[in-house]
């Protein structure tokens, strides 16, 4: 990493949206790897530290205890990278109902680690990290209290790739492609499960206890399907990127 890419403890806490005290608490619990030592033995943190903090915060939002989070992190490979941590976080976030949070521009800039221009806000909105106001409007706008509605699941990713030189039109088109195909996949999977599992089960005239047990079992399917879809998409994307350019 370049010198400019390293973060000190204050910068890492700001980028993760937590306090330095919370960061040090996580470190003391062994949830965060020790930092690299830079000049004058000052601790330096990188993308893996930020990714792990974001995953910890997401696990806490899901209601996991610190002991459960510690067990979850202990099962990750020792060499897990920031991309893998982002995938884990996306999978965890997908289990939570879709909700919007509000965040001020100052908070956004602390999370980004720099001042944000109106063009940056447009890019975040194109990625779905900031929700347009009014809904489906052309641009993100601050509401009366000076805050923005944001998607907590997409915001860390949006801020992470904010400076990647991708045209705004490409971001909008890419989001449309993902939404189109994800909806089609979800529809086909739902129809497959309904026709081959749920309807035959109902036709067997199950007792109330069996019906409740089936409902409970099917509730566990969603995270498994999401993980399978993410894994399949990652492999397909890797194959596409490794193919010879036409």
Image (cartoon, rainbow, N blue to C red):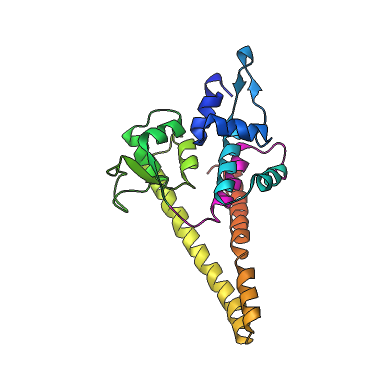
Residue drawn 54% across the image and 51% down it: 93
The percent position of residue 71, horizontal first and vertical second, equals 71, 46
Asked where in the image residue 208 lies, by quadrant, the reply is bottom right
Q: Say whether residue 69 is left or right of residue 130.
A: right
> 50 or 180, which lies in front?
50
Q: Residue furthest left?
A: 144
Query: Does residue 174 appear anywhere in the picture?
Result: yes
Q: Say whether residue 145 is left or right of residue 128.
A: left
Residue drawn 56% across the image and 30% down it: 21
Q: Is residue 40 magenta?
A: no
Q: Say whether residue 162 is left or right of residue 195.
A: left
Asked where in the image residue 9 lies, by quadrant, the reply is top right
The percent position of residue 32, horizontal first and vertical second, equals 65, 34
Asked where in the image residue 41 lies, by quadrant, the reply is top right
The percent position of residue 140, horizontal first and vertical second, equals 32, 44
Residue drawn 59% across the image and 53% down it: 230
> Where 65 sits versus 181, above or below?
above
Query: Does residue 161 appear anywhere in the picture?
Result: no
The percent position of residue 100, horizontal first and vertical second, equals 42, 51
Give the magenta range: 75-99
Q: Is residue 92 magenta?
A: yes
> Where 19 sits versus 75, above or below?
above
Q: Say whether residue 226 is left or right of residue 71.
A: left
- The image quadrant where one finds the N terminus is top right
């Amino acid at each position: 990493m370049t010198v400019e890419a390293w973060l000190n403890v204050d910068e890492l806490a700001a980028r993760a949206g937590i306090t330095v005290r919370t960061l040090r608490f996580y470190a003391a619990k062994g949830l965060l790897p020790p930092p690299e030592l830079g000049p004058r033995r000052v601790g330096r943190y990188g993308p893996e530290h930020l990714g792990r903090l974001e995953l910890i915060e997401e696990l806490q939002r899901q209601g996991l205890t610190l002991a459960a989070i510690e067990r979850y992190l202990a099962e990750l490979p020792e060499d897990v990278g920031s991309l893998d941590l982002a995938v884990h976080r996306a999978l965890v976030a997908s289990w939570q109902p879709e909700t919007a949070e509000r965040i001020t521009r100052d908070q956004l800039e602390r999370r980004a680690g720099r001042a944000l221009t109106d063009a940056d806000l447009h890019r975040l909105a194109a990625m779905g990290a900031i929700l347009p106001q009014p809904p489906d409007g052309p641009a993100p706008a601050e509401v009366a209290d000076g805050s923005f509605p944001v998607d907590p699941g997409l915001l860390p990713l949006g801020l992470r790739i904010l400076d990647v030189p991708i045209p705004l039109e490409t971001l909008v088109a890419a989001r449309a492609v993902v939404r189109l195909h994800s909806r089609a996949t979800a529809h086909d999977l739902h129809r497959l499960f309904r026709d081959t599992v749920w309807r035959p089960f109902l036709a067997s005239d199950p007792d109330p206890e069996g019906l409740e047990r089936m409902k409970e079992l099917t509730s566990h399917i969603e995270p498994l399907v999401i993980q399978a879809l993410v894994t399949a998409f990652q492999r397909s994307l890797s194959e596409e990127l490794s193919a010879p350019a036409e």
